[in-house]
Amino acid sequence: MNVLVTGGTGFIGSHATIALLKKDHDVTIVDNLSNSKIDTLRAIENVSLKKVRFIELDLLDIKALDCLFKKNKFDIVIHFAGSKSVNESIEKPLKYYFNNVYSSIILSQIMKKYDVKKIIFSSSATVYGEPADIPLKESSKVSILNPYAASKYYIENYFREYQKQNKDWKIILLRYFNPIGAHESGLIGESPKVPHNNLMPYILKVASKESEYLQVFGDDYDTEDGTGVRDFIHIMDLAEAHVSSLDFISSNQGPDGFCNIFNIGTGKGYSVLEIIETFSKVNNIEIPYKIVDRRPGDVSQSYTDVSLAKKSLNWKAKKDLSDMCRDVWRWKSSQLKKNN
Ligand SMILES: NC(=O)c1ccc[n+]([C@@H]2O[C@H](COP(=O)([O-])OP(=O)(O)OC[C@H]3O[C@@H](n4cnc5c(N)ncnc54)[C@H](O)[C@@H]3O)[C@@H](O)[C@H]2O)c1
């Protein structure tokens, strides 16, 4: 298929592009490089040994987007582009309405103009907020706690309504849990420009001696060891979920469209202490840590029921926490060597 990948030089988009190229899809990436580097493109090509087309473009630039669609016949769009920092969204909420919500609306309008009716969108498990029931199902109650989650939920609702008005559109909304890790080659991984406050980048800072110790936010949650529990998923497993979603859309050839939501995680909850321990063990590096107060807005535990994605998309995560910790350190070590 001829696939347009928005945000394709970012963390998830770049790894998904590798998975798509492996299945012989033609990929065009558009990205404004606001949170990624052009070097990622070379890394994608080095890993996949295939060429990928890249156009530096901001999705808010309607004319440029129109011109891109005029010149190309895409079969499907995989839409990763957007801003993703919860903290930044609290400081700059409007940025999230423009860069996430408005750009998605523009994209859908241009797609309609050029008769492209298939899209896979990156939503997020943050829409569940503090989980009402665990494991989380696609039908679980949504609870919006910050502008980032709000922006994702607005886009989901927009696409749901859009599909009702445009019944032949085939739409998949993927609610990702917590992607970590890197491609097993160590040639590509996450290198954002805008810092975000996820656990793994902090662990990597301690492992590489950029920070003295890791702060563990709270050990009095209602979990087995008292620390927060999350559904961490290997980035290549998440990448594969996009290939499976694309297969799902292609195999539904009938005239009727749909707008389906799938939770994408491993179905397992890992605690912060479990991650520190696994990282230390597989990489033979000590990670000193201190328990500090809970961080406002953090939920106690979040992990998904994987049955719907397994049944409908024929997809499930294959890699475990050791793989995630080993691969991410391989990537970080290669970066450290390169910069020394
Ligand atoms: N990483 C996570 O933990 C996570 C979890 C759930 C959902 N998501 C969502 O998945 C998607 C991809 O996440 P990621 O981790 O790869 O983020 P990322 O920041 O690494 O990648 C997003 C890419 O989009 C580009 N971009 C941003 N605004 C753009 C615009 N207006 N026009 C063109 N390009 C633009 C950035 O330069 C970046 O390369 C995002 O929509 C994010 O909200 C991420």
Image (tube, grey):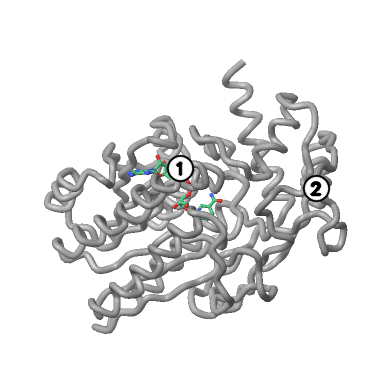
* Contact check, label 1 and label 2, Cβ < 8 Å: no
Task: Please tell me which residue lies in front, 225 or 179.
Answer: 225
Q: Residue at x 79, y 26 (%)?
A: 212
Residue type at mark 2 is Thr
Task: Please tell me which residue lies in front, 155 or 320.
Answer: 155
Q: Residue at x 56, y 62 (%)?
A: 125
Residue indicated by mark 2: 278
**Is 82 on the left or on the right of 311, as rendered?**
left
How many discs appear?
A: 2
Residue type at mark 1 is Lys
Instruction: Estimate the spatial distance between the alpha carbons at disc 1 and disc 2, rounded to whole Å.
Output: 35 Å
Residue 315 x/y as whole percent: 54, 70
SS state under label 2: helix
**Residue 275 versus residue 207 in the image, above or below:** below
For the N terminus, the image quarter is bottom left
Residue 324, which numbered label? none
Residue 267 x/y as whole percent: 67, 68
Residue indicated by mark 1: 92
Q: How busy is the neighbourhood of tag 1: few (under 14 within 10 Å), some, or many (20 plus)?
A: few
**Is 329 on the left or on the right of 54, as rendered?**
right
